[in-house]
Image (cartoon, rainbow, N blue to C red):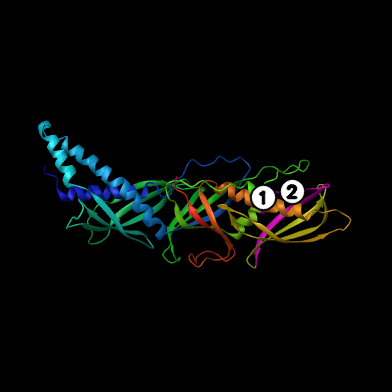
Amino acid sequence: MNIKRSILIAIVGITLLGSLFLAPLSVAARPETSQATTTINTSIYLTAEALKPYFQERINQQVPQSVNGVIDSLVKKQPQQQQGWMKAMAGALLQPGATLTDLTTQQDGLVTSLRLSLYQGDPKPTDAQLLVTLSVLDQQTIQVSAKPLAHSPALFQGPLTTLHVPLGQLQQITTTPSCGQSALGLDLGLPLSFKENKPENSPQSTTLASLQPLAMTQQAGLSGTVIEIPETSLASIGKGIGALSLGNNLYARNIQISVQNGQLVSVSDITLGQSLKLGVATTLIQPDAAQGKLAMKVQKTTLKVLSLFDFEVDAYNQQIEQQINMQLNTALANTFTVTEATIGSNASVPCTANTSLLLTGTLRAL
């Protein structure tokens, strides 16, 4: 059987590239959102160290099966009486495999280094390098393309495959060579759904105990991922919450969220009925993580309210916590497991702003 080594190497390489980028960012169908939504700007940073083992796992699963399929196709073109022994010989001699030896980021793309072999112990494995580029195809899709680097075998050149972003509406994707451990940065709009607050009804209670941990999948996700929610986006969450009923015809309105001294600060007008302003509540909130989800915790609330009104501080604190946690956890549901939540720049991802909410954890690939 005359199967040229260069053809098989090219097949292994092309198959490998397809397997590398078919699934890392793919997730289940997006949850439906109501028409009353606020879209906030968000950035996701993926590290090269998290991408490497994930890509290698895809290589191990995809390459042998795909190359064997190509061999079967070639064997079928031979005389029928020869196909049996040709397929048996090819199966015995060829055990194609590929190893991702390096993945580095530079300004114009990801440099992907591969070592391709036709069988175990291949004395002449082929080393190749390609520059993989990513661009926005539409709000849900990333276009992946590749081209060989100088002095490297030309395994593939041109459009390679497409990716579906894990959540939100994709605005921009860039490599991040000057951002610490980050390799890729995705800028996206994250829709948040806000139900209309009806003052005549008491709000539903959502305690931290009801925030069940996300079920682990058999397939590993992308650990070390950082999601950045800037201060301007946090402010939009406050505006979207609207009015909170506090009982006794008291309400918290005009909720403003900002960042001060490494904490979230919520300032609310306290009103009697629809419009009579009685005072102001200022709340300090510390971000935290629990059971794989964001868990905001109120540290202190300072009140400037007329003393003749009975103001339930605990009820107010609980509702502020619940509203922020609910909005962000719902938007990230089943796609991201939170292991740490902080305010300020991250040493491993220094390009983030010191007034942003940073969620560190695992981005799931379902």
Query: Which region of the structure is painted magenta?
Result: 238-260
Residue linked to disc 1 = 323
Q: Amino acid at mark 1?
A: Gln
Q: Amino acid at mark 2?
A: Leu
Residue at the (39%, 56%) spot, across then down? 51
Residue 205 picture location, percent across and down: 70, 45
Q: CA distance from mark 2 to mark 1?
A: 10 Å
Pick the quarter of the image with the C terminus: top left
Residue 109 picture location, percent across and down: 37, 59
Residue at the (62%, 56%) spot, across then down? 234
The disc label shown at residue 88, or none: none
The disc label shown at residue 244, or none: 2
Question: Is 217 placed left or right of 250 in the picture?
Answer: left
Residue at the (67%, 46%) spot, across then down? 206
The front one of 236 and 349 is: 349
Residue at the (70%, 53%) spot, across then down? 320
